[in-house]
Amino acid sequence: MANTYTQLYVHFVFAVQNRLSLINKTWQKELYQYICGIVHKNEHRVIAINGVADHVHLLVSMHPKQTVSDLMHDVKRNSSLWINEQKLVMGKFSWQEGFGAFTYSKSQISNVAIYIENQEEHHKKANFREEYLKMLEKFDVTFDEKYIFHEIE
């Protein structure tokens, strides 16, 4: 890809299957490091990563050689395998199907990174579903309510 120059910033949001609060603080940083390794291996650059027990936010400077969907497939598949191999949860860990991906301009990156870094504080005021719906509305994303992340009933 000589002579290909891009500036592609993508904010990913993805949740634990059934929105269960399975990401434990005792191994959360290791998980984030592992995810960063996957992103780096695919020649992208992590700008920010954080989340809470039921979901993750990941801000990436994308290399154009890989699609957004392929990167998320790699991240979710390989991190699930790692969590299960390490036996970090009882039973089988998996990510919810689907994800959110939102693009930003360079001038917005520092604010998005701060937002991601402050996830714990942010979620004292709003739950994940409220946050996710706000993002979809802000970006004018058409969605089907039946595919939005739901709590277990």
Image (cartoon, grey):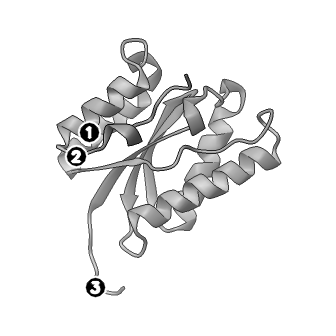
Q: Earlier in the sequence, mark 1 or mark 3?
A: 3
Looking at the image, is 66 positioned above or below residue 143? below
Residue 107 as seen in the image, left or right of residue 126: left
Residue 119 visible to the viewer = yes
* Three-letter residue code for mark 1: Leu
* Three-letter residue code for mark 3: Asn
- Around disc 1, counting alpha carbons within 10 Å, would you say few (fewer than 14), some (14 to 19), or many (20 or more)? some
Residue 152 locus on image (x, y percent): 56, 26
Q: Which residue is mark 1?
A: 136
Looking at the image, is 36 positioned above or below residue 150? below
- Around disc 2, counting alpha carbons within 10 Å, would you say few (fewer than 14), some (14 to 19), or many (20 or more)? few
Q: Residue at x 58, y 53 (%)?
A: 76
Mark pair 2, 1: CA separation: 5 Å
Q: Earlier in the sequence, mark 2 or mark 3?
A: 3
Res. 117 image quadrant = top left
Q: Which residue is mark 3?
A: 3
Residue 138 as seen in the image, left or right of residue 16: left
Q: Which residue is mark 2?
A: 141
Residue 90 locus on image (x, y percent): 80, 33
